[in-house]
Amino acid sequence: MKEKLESIREAWEKALVGLRKLVKNFRTSSSEDSPPRAKSEQASTKRRHLRILGAYLLLLIVIMTGFILGQGQRAERFSPSPGGMEALLENGEAQQEEGEEESREVILYPREEKVTEEREEGQAAEEEPALDQERENFMWPLQGEILAHYHQVYQVGNQYRLHQGIDLKAPRGTSVQAALSGRVEKVTLDPALGEVVVLSHPGDLITLYGNLAQARVEEGQEVKKGQEIALVGETALLDASPGSYLHFEVREGDISRDPMEYLP
């Protein structure tokens, strides 16, 4: 920095010396014996040259001043205060401690997830007997080959759909029995599944029977497990299987469930 300032000062002094020589030459170059017209031309030339030199000199001053100020600000920016280094060290140590705390917190996450998984496994183990009991309570609505499984993807036209139940193959007119005792909630015609009977059961369970030919129960009626509720038909228009079969669903509230988890 000192070397740069010294070189600038030397260049500045040389420029001033050259300016003084130029002004001196302008003064000595005029002669008293020259004609008046020549003297006036020389005077105008000197003034013009002086203006040019003044402009160059002003430009030089602006450049040098800007350079010096910029160097000074840069030096102030990078020169730490007496307590600056200590503050930086303290900040660095604080950030390091925060990073260690964050790393310790990250290490804790898998343990928490493990505990959560153990709790979920414990809860699942507690719920298994209830599920087993429900499976024991269910019965097959009819005996037949499974044509379409739960969550099987099937195509209707240009659309792909997810099968929400199972389709059991059966001849037209086969008796459909209630899989569990309950209450008839709906007897209706569904645009996709055709003639449908919906039963509600304890534990917020619902069973749905579709692609029926004829319902043998009415809404609001109480039915027993194994009681005939309908006959198999061919009324479904947008289901996974063609022909005569029973479409059977199990729901827990509004959530669709795999019927195979409940059937014995």
Image: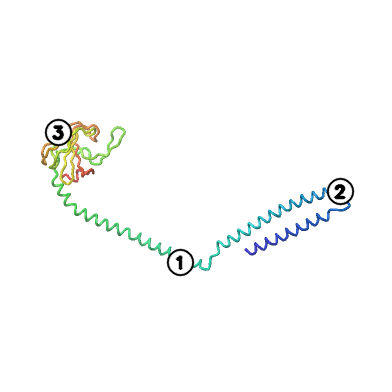
Q: Which residue is mark 1?
A: 90
Quadrant for the C terminus in the image: top left
Q: Nearer the viewer, mark 1 or mark 3?
A: 1
Q: Residue at image x 35%, y 60%? A: 105
Looking at the picture, how far across and down is residue 82, in whole percent?
A: 53, 68
The kind of secondary structure element at disc 3 is: strand
Residue 7 or residue 228, whichever sits in front: 7
Q: Residue at image x 30%, y 58%? A: 112
Earlier in the chain: of badge 1 and badge 3, it is 1
Q: Amino acid at mark 2?
A: Pro
Residue 194: assigned label: none
Crowd around label 3: few <14 · some 14–19 · many ≥20 (10 Å): some
Q: Find residue 123 and report its image quarter.
A: bottom left
Left of 103 or right of it: where is 31? right
Q: Are marks 2 and 3 in contact (CB under 8 Å)?
A: no
Q: Which residue is mark 2?
A: 36
Q: Are marks 1 and 3 in contact (CB under 8 Å)?
A: no
Looking at the picture, how far across and down is residue 175, in whole percent?
A: 12, 35
Q: Residue at image x 83%, y 48%? A: 40
The kind of secondary structure element at disc 2 is: helix
CA separation, marks 2 and 3? 133 Å
Q: Which residue is mark 3?
A: 215
Earlier in the chain: of badge 2 and badge 1, it is 2
